[in-house]
Image (cartoon, rainbow, N blue to C red):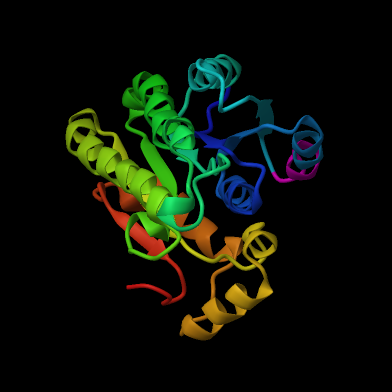
Amino acid sequence: MTDKPVMLIAGGSGSIGSATAREALAQGWAVALHGNTPAKLATLETELSALGTVECFQGDVFAADGAETLVAEVAERFGRIDAVIDCVAAGVDGIRGLFPDTRPAAFTPFYDVSTGWLMRLSHAAYPHLKVRGGTIISFISDAGVYAAPHQTMIGAVRAASVGFIRNLSREAGRDQIRAHVISVSYVEGSDIVARIGPERMKTAQRRAGLGLPTALDIAPMTVFLCGPGAAKITGQVISINGGLNA
């Protein structure tokens, strides 16, 4: 149990999730950090514990009851949940590339582990967020907002997350719950560099007039949207991409 506000960061062992955890801890939050790799979580918990109250939770986002189990474990440990940040970026083979090269068998599993996961996570957390008026934030790819080749399936599923969050915000406001989307594209220092190759990254760096963001550029906005300074803001889609898209 804790008197501090509690932030659950799903998929939090990556660069954006861990940077958000550090920012939240610096601002007095307690953090429940979720991931899929026990060794990575153990390292993060040791590192972050020096900054404040943090506990890591291992869970498989592909499990049918994964979201419900995670929320129940966090609520039991801390006694409250005040913000839910969904940084899960699990992929499924067969959804990247030009549309004719994708695999129809991958479409439903990808939706289920992306927008479906977000829906289940939000549904499970809703009763806890309702107690004090909390916040839900979904991280998506810019492909869900801005059209681009090779992104048809990713864009479709992430756009579904945008539609879910925006409509949810209209309902959840009645319970003092806020909901937002943060959209990112190329993030310096993230795993995307290895996935897309250095040449595409260099092209993005040239196009981004403000420079591509790092996870440290993204974390402050994430925590701000969960705090009292954003109490009257909801239903927004905020793209943090250094001017790459607008």
Q: Position of residue 224 (x, y in %)?
A: 43, 53
Residue 74: quarter of image: top right
Q: Position of residue 124 (x, y in %)?
A: 41, 20
Q: Quadrant of the C terminus?
A: bottom left
Identify which residue, 229 or 102, lies in the foreground: 102
| Residue 228 in view | no
Residue 107: quarter of image: top left
| Residue 48 in view | yes
Q: Is residue 142 above or below residue 136?
A: below
Q: Position of residue 231 (x, y in %)?
A: 29, 46
Q: Which residues are magenta?
A: 45-51
Q: Quadrant of the N terminus?
A: top right
Residue at 66% of width from left, 26% of height from top? 57
Identify which residue, 48 or 73, lies in the foreground: 73
Tell whether position 48 is magenta: yes
Residue at 61% of width from left, 41% of height from top? 12
- Taking the view exactly as shown, the residue that stands out farthest to the front is 100
Left or right, 211 with respect to 171, comes to right
Left or right, 245 with respect to 222, comes to left
Residue at 35% of width from left, 19% of height from top? 127
